[in-house]
Amino acid sequence: MSFRKFTRLATVAAVFLTAYLLLSQTDLVYVYQGQEWRAWKYTPSSFDWRKRPHTHPVDEATMTRLPEGNPRQLPRIQHKFSKDELSKSHNETQRERREAVRNVAKRSWRAYRDYAWGRDEVAPQTLVGQDTFAGWGATLVDSLDTLWIMGMKKDFGDAVRHVATIDWNNATSWDCSLFETNIRYLGGLLSAYDLSQEKVLLDKAIELGDMLHAAFDTPNHMPANAFHFQTAKEGKLVASGHESSAAVGSLSLEFTRLSQLTGDSKYYHAIDGIKKELERTQDTTSLPGMWPIFINLQNNFFTSGTSFSLGASADSAYEYLSKMHALLGGLDPTYEKLHTKAMATAAKHVLFRPMLPDPAPDVLFPGTVLSNGLIAELSPEVQHLGCFAGGMFALGGRLFADEAHVAIGDRLARGCAWAYAAFPTGVMPETAVLIPCQPTPKEGGRDDKAKSNPKPKDNLAPCPWNETRWSAATGERARTQQLPRGVAGLSSTQYLLRPEAIESVFVLYRLTGAADLLDTAWDMFEAIRKATRTRLAHSAIADVRATGKTAKLDLMESFWIAETLKYFYLIFSEPELINLDDYVFNTEAHPFRLPKPEGESLE
Ligand SMILES: *[C@@H]1O[C@H](CO)[C@@H](O)[C@H](O)[C@H]1NC(C)=O
Ligand SMILES: *[C@@H]1O[C@H](CO)[C@@H](O)[C@H](O)[C@H]1NC(C)=O
Ligand SMILES: *[C@@H]1O[C@H](CO)[C@@H](O)[C@H](O)[C@H]1NC(C)=O
């Protein structure tokens, strides 16, 4: 072969090789300023919600805009960890614990990747894909920021490539939940964008935000949580007459962040209308300061309900009040007012100290209150979902300089940790009934009070363990239901891989620096890992009382990787990773970057 022929052949081969490499990659990798970037192959959704005119348009001139001005310097949130504390607690032990969490995340993600890629969830035992949240890949989108935080960059890149092609117009159901879509998908995209600055994530967030914004295209501009795609396209949605307060109150962080990132105030305007209604009705309910679990959105934000709670269907409506204050850089004073009143009411009526066996820990739990405006009656049923309340009280306490609320938060977080340790698996059940220190009306508590001087009762005051009282409250059930001492009943024995307990333990650790919480978290993690493990992933379990092998429910919701494992990973990481002075978490554990005052920094 002549030299010329050889070079020609070599050139042809090189061209083919380059062409092959280019075609086999769906995205182009290039290096700019020493960093690797990708030009993702972005596929817009097949329906553009921005082009659909609203039936009930908002007048541009009267639209509420993001508050103007330099964000205020907020009080320091995180404990100032000294060098000594850091070297003492963040040692080899924490590195090993973090690695153990990461390994659980890896195997869970791989099960999803290999058996349910692009679907909403993988069934962790039978290993089939399931679509439970409209089929846009809930686990994939919800996991993005966890993958980033855990340094699983290759998996992150593969997931982003998929996100770039999601078609919001290609759902597997006729409708979706505005609330769930907002916290999991929109929250997941915004957070992953805040962390990685991958522009395609913001592009997809805007597409989705424009769709969800159409939920506010109703006669009274209150959102329709049941987002029926066809009805929305026809502009005929109406808000529900019976809506959970959580669904109403948990849109604010995501819609505000989207307005901040795009400069378009329409999302912020929509949720500001809800804030105004919360403010208008706060003192008019039958438990003034709080809102009933269900609200009539269709009819003038009617709040006549009699049931009040920090748990299911209400939770994040309260969680978002202080967090909105932080995200807006303290520029809207309303959120502080809403939070402060709501927490004062909750502390007085909803929280209680349970009667627990010796050595009785100094802990609190949130229950549920029935109130008709005259009598407020506490039902001491506690929910795993309510375990986030510790973090909420503590965070609000720091933000609004109320250390008593940080202490309440600490006792709440430790309450759920107690409930983990109380059961044979080391895991807390979905719902349990406890015995409040203050006697309940059924036990004659009210009569006692009526007879004696009506001293204001203190729900948070301690009491000694009284075996007779516990036996009287439980009867045969203590034996037939295998109730741990202190527990008076079980409404659901399941553990669904939920995050709220570790969420509060994580927040309290970051806020107080109490190193014993690291060991508490590790005990919780080890118990969960063991009780939920399947061959390739992890599953919700049927009964936390199991002493041997646990029965699996073949369910692994997207919050397992998005929230539970993220909080476990973060608590064992250096406190600088996702510093709570720089980020605020949405209710699906997606951190959003906080605005910072110009030219100032925390010393
Ligand atoms: C690391 O710190 C923990 C406290 O969180 C302590 O119990 C442990 O002994 C330390 N381990 C080492 C190897 O120093
Ligand atoms: C729509 O979804 C189906 C499965 O649900 C999928 O097979 C199809 O490729 C999707 N089409 C587009 C355009 O995304
Ligand atoms: C324990 O509880 C029982 C039943 O409620 C009550 O009669 C008794 O006085 C209590 N004992 C003490 C020491 O408080």
Image: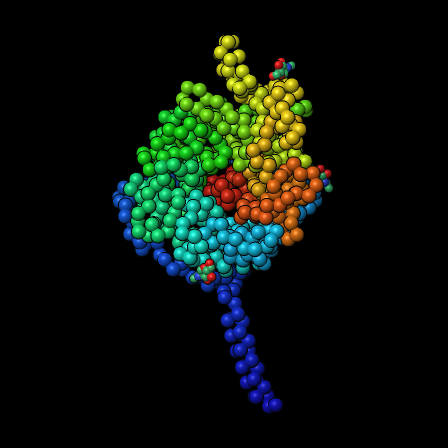
Quadrant holding the N terminus:
bottom right
Say if 338 sits above or below 143 in the image: above
User: Image point 42% across, 30% down: which residue?
Assistant: 292
User: Image point 66% across, 24% down: which residue?
Assistant: 357
Q: In the image shown, does 476 or 491 lie closer to the viewer?
A: 476
Q: Position of residue 34 (x, y in %)?
A: 54, 60
Residue sitting at the far bottom = 2
Query: In terms of image quadrants, where is residue 361?
Result: top right
Q: Is residue 375 left or right of residue 516?
A: left
Query: In terms of image quadrants, where is residue 470?
Result: top right
On the rendering, which quadrant does ligand 1 occupy?
A: top right
Q: Position of residue 268 (x, y in %)?
A: 37, 43
Q: Is residue 492 left or right of residue 231?
A: right
Q: Position of residue 139 (x, y in %)?
A: 52, 51
Residue sitting at the far top = 452
Say if 118 sits above or below 296 in the image: below
Does residue 585 appear anywhere in the picture?
yes
Does residue 398 appear anywhere in the picture?
no
Could you tell me how many numbered marks the image carries? 0
Q: Position of residue 461 (x, y in %)?
A: 57, 20
User: Image point 41% across, 23% down: which residue?
Assistant: 372
User: Image point 58% across, 20% down: which residue?
Assistant: 437
Say if 147 sits above or below 568 in the image: below
Say if 547 sits above or below 558 in the image: above
The colour scheme used to paint the residues is rainbow
